[in-house]
Image (cartoon, rainbow, N blue to C red):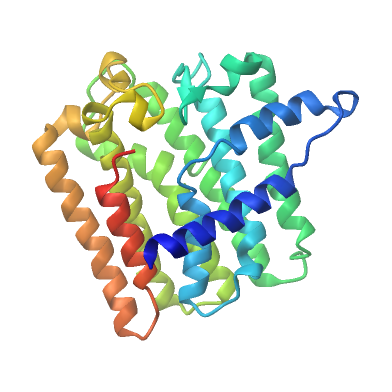
Amino acid sequence: MFEQHYQNLINQIEAGLDAALPPLAVAEGGTVVEASRYSLLSGGKRIRPVLLLATLESLGLQLDLGLPYALAIEMIHTYSLIHDDLPCMDDDDFRRGRPTCHKQFGEALAVLAGDTLLNRAFEIVLDNKMSGRENGLKAAQIIARSAGSQGMIAGQALDLAAEGRIIEPEALRLLHSLKTGRLIAAPVLAACALAGAAEDVTRDFQDFAENLGLAFQIQDDILDVTATSEKLGKTTGKDSRDLKSTYVTLFGLDQAQSMLREVTGLAKQALQRLADRGYSVDFLFGLTEFLLTRDY
């Protein structure tokens, strides 16, 4: 049941992404769009847009209301990966099982491809005619703030500053809550905004999302040392070679796995509170378990 519904959501997202950024002739900037589509349509778990749509479902709303925001979130996430892979950032050669955007198209075009996706994301949201709807504006603001200098970009800056040195556990948690966690919490909070959810309900969803974001990052750190590059779709073992602090390098594999179970448990507790209120969160329980046990 979970797998089928997850695939149904992914199918909607994939079709929406393909339609939202159609190919262009070279004379009209088609090469940049080709580079953007190369990264955007390369697959992946689509966790962020799935979270937005699934949260809307839990709140009893139609998916059509949230699809533009879900597409925007995935475009912003993909732009961040393109830029994160650049030689001046993490300098990665592979992403989702194939060469990174800058390896395929060159650094300059990769920068422009990321910029294209960031701008197209908010164009889609504005095309949704949300400008007259307070809830839509609030959702767009949540997404923008989570991706900007108070969220993901701030986390990336902290990540760059931390390279080559050991940082304190609280500093690591802050780094990842910004770089990874904010853009995982954003779709959940945006869905709450679109639905006009009450503050106490939004708090439970936020508690769920923030713990899920931390669990997601810890599992990423674990997979960097336990998975193969072929399975993961990107270079493994790179964090330790680049002398980056991770949950594994700071705490060891066993403790990192224990922390993963702990924060996943907190995410599930938040979902249970929502279930006790009468919200349908079975799919979100399944998604949480999937992220805990994933091997890619």
Residue 158 occupies quadrant: top left
Q: Is residue 44 above or below residue 157?
A: below
In the rendered image, the vertical position of residue 288 relative to residue 103, given as above or below = below
- Quadrant of residue 169 within the rendered picture: top left
Locate the N terminus by quadrant: bottom left
Residue 211 in view here: no
Q: Residue furthest left?
A: 254
Q: How many marks?
A: 0
Whole-percent x, y for residue 295 in the image = 29, 40
- Residue extending furthest toward the right: 27
- Looking at the image, which residue is at 12% across and 47% down? 258
Residue 216's x, y, as percent? 32, 46
Query: Residue 237, position in %: x, y?
Result: 28, 20
- Seen in the picture, residue 154 relative to 66 is either above or below; the reply is above
- Please state if 35 lies on the left or on the right of 288 as rendered: right
Residue found at x 43% / y 36%: 155
In percent of width and height, residue 182 lies at 44, 49
| Screen quadrant of the C terminus | top left
x 42%, y 39%: residue: 179
